Amino acid sequence: MDSKRPFEIAECQQAAKGLKSSWQDMAGSEALIRALVAERNGDTPLALFWTEVHRAICEESKAF
């Protein structure tokens, strides 16, 4: 994902599906770790993307 452009909700949903297929029940944790790494690297837009992916995973699994 190019973090210099705004992300689309469809991209977040696609990333959520990809993480769920690879990480199963740990997909949400993986998304948050990626958000943390992006933020630590100074890439706030990418960190926001991964937090939105986490939200999509939670909504899909009806965690809240």
Image: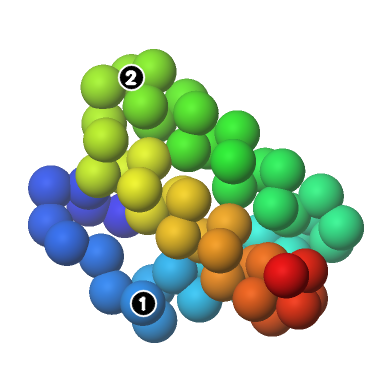
**The furthest residue to the top:** 40
Q: Kindly identify the amino acid type of the residue bearing the numbered disc 2.
A: Asn
Question: Considering only vertical position in the picture, is 12 above or below 39?
Answer: below
Q: Which residue shows up at 56% across the image and 71% down it? A: 56
- The quarter holding residue 29 reads top right
Residue 8 point in image, percent of width and height: 28, 74
Q: Which residue shows up at 25% across the image and 44% down it? A: 45
Other-residue count near label 2 (Cα within 10 Å), few / some / many at <14 / 14–19 / ≥20: few
Q: Which residue shows up at 26% across the image and 22% down it? A: 42
Q: Which residue shows up at 65% across the image and 68% down it? A: 57
The answer to whether residue 21 is seen in the rendering is no
**The furthest residue to the front:** 64
Q: Kindly identify the amino acid type of the residue bearing the numbered disc 1.
A: Ile
- Quadrant of the image for the N terminus? bottom left
Q: Horizontal placement of 1 versus 16: left or right? A: left
Label tally: 2
Mark positioned earlier in the residue sequence (1 or 2):
1
Q: Horizontal placement of 25 versus 8: left or right? A: right
Residue nearest the observer in this picture, 30 or 58: 58
Q: What's the coloring here?
A: rainbow
Residue 35 point in image, percent of width and height: 48, 38
Residue on which disc 1 sits:
9
Q: Horizontal placement of 11 versus 2: left or right? A: right
Q: Are marks 1 and 2 in contact (CB under 8 Å)?
A: no
Other-residue count near label 1 (Cα within 10 Å), few / some / many at <14 / 14–19 / ≥20: few
- The quarter holding residue 9 reads bottom left
Residue 19 point in image, percent of width and height: 66, 60
Question: Considering only vertical position in the picture, is 43 above or below 53?
Answer: above
Q: CA distance from mark 1 to mark 2?
A: 23 Å
Q: Name the mark on residue 41.
A: 2
Q: Name the mark on residue 28.
A: none
Question: Considering only vertical position in the picture, is 54 above or below 29?
Answer: below
